[in-house]
Amino acid sequence: MMKKFSLYILLAAFIFPSCKKYLDVNENPNSPTTAPINGLLGQVTYQSALDEYRIAYLTTNYVQYFASPNPASASDIYESIDASGTWTSLYNTMTDIYDMQQLGANSGSSEHEGVAKILMALNLKFVHDIWGDAPFTEAFTSETITPSYDGAQAIYAKCLSLLDEGIALLQQPTSAFNLDPSLDFIHHGSKSAWIKTAYALKARFLSLVSKLPSYNPDAVLTALNNAYTSNSDDAQITTFSSRNPWAQVALNNAALLLDGFLSTQYIDMMDGTIYGNFDPRLPMIATLTQYSDYRGTPNGVGRIGTGIDDEESYLKVDGYYSSTNSPLIIISYAETKFLEAEAKFRKGTDMTGAYNAYLDGIRANMNKMGVSAVDRDAYVNSPIVSVGSANLTLALIFKEKYKALFLSSETWNDARRTNYNYSGFSLPANAVLSTYIRRLDYPSVETSRNGSNVPTISGLDQKFWWDQ
């Protein structure tokens, strides 16, 4: 109780009365903050982790982790949805990050400025991945409340440069102010941990362009050489003002506010229906049905039964990802091992290294979740998983990455850059598109106040520049 109470006090002091935001329509949205710099650190680290959740929640149906309990729900069948809340949260967070960056630069606090640049890259990349072109260059100054849009490719390049700038700042030997460990909710004041995270994010960002000639596996591997070496390095938060937001999803469902219904695709991938081997992580994620098995909800069809009698599987109230203090993960060691496997596979000169990284990614995620060594080894050593380096494929790497990154925002990027090439994947029933969804519409909060600058898109099947 003391841990939660202390966080509540910190958030009440530093987060809730935050500075004016880009989307505050009745005030100058770019007024400089006067909050203490470590107060801003608390705000931006906490909110950046929640932004990871917000993006993941927005896209879980698109990657068929979840399915709507209602038939032909917009989130299932690729109808336009208004993601104004997520857009607003991202720009609110980036406004506070911008303020911390400016305060850090003006006060000589290279540590805060460095973390700000890394978190700006993270949040800006979220915007890039969902909407493409977006306001950035003019978004956080006092010059306009209707900023022009930066092109998506320029935003992507900016994200990479922000990471490099953040790393350089954190490598400086002195700083006017140090990161407050109690207000850095991600890495608790560790500069070395932030540097590793910046390199891990860089490897993720560089992998996004795997469809393009510019993809450089050596650059990915160079970044990974400076990134994580164990699960203890993961960027995550474990302390919340109330509870992990995925726990709230599970509790909402238990209270009959139907949510967190697991997709048929996901259940079939995990219970052996598709691949022939049961995944020991499934009982740590999903509820058993009244039939003592696991059953998913078909995307686009809606719930099988009443929704209250356990005819299908839901996100567990006490699951690994959905307990009160479960970690809310931004990027993990397991993910970096799959990025390594992919890069080495695509390079083609170290298939043994690619294969070992693939297996290490599985083990890392299972170890993090607390899967027993017996169950872990039985799964990894099965001939379906341990295929040998000569038989490794990208499909196997992405299949296991999809499992290990359950509820991660990054899996929609993976789905798009592999053209949704997962066994058992199919278009949702009643889909309004003839192909898989590739992007979202711009939200009404933006079209209503900055409509003259909002780009026109051809539809939700429009591919981004990196998805060609």
Image (cartoon, helix red, strand yellow):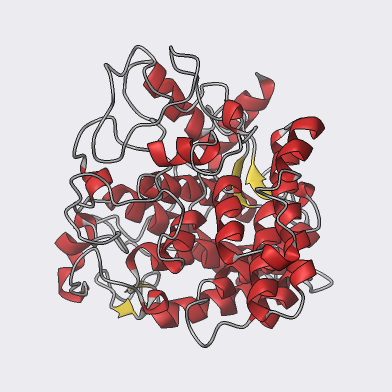
Q: Which residue shows up at 49% across the image and 20% down it?
A: 293
Q: Position of residue 282 (x, y in %)?
A: 57, 31
From the viewer's perspective, tell me whether residue 264 is left or right of residue 96: left
The part of the image, by quadrant, that contains residue 340 is bottom right
**Residue 28 visible in the snapshot:** no
Residue that lies at the very extreme toward the right in this rendered image: 173
Closer to the camera in the image, 171 or 154 = 154
Q: Is residue 401 above or below residue 274?
A: below
Picture quarter with the C terminus:
bottom left
Q: Is residue 103 above or below residue 218?
A: above
Q: Is residue 404 above or below residue 450?
A: above
From the viewer's perspective, tell me whether residue 399 is left or right of residue 445: right
From the viewer's perspective, tell me whether residue 155 is left or right of residue 87: right
Q: Which residue shows up at 75% across the image and 37% down it?
A: 378
Q: Position of residue 271 (x, y in %)?
A: 53, 33
Q: Is residue 408 above or below residue 209?
A: above
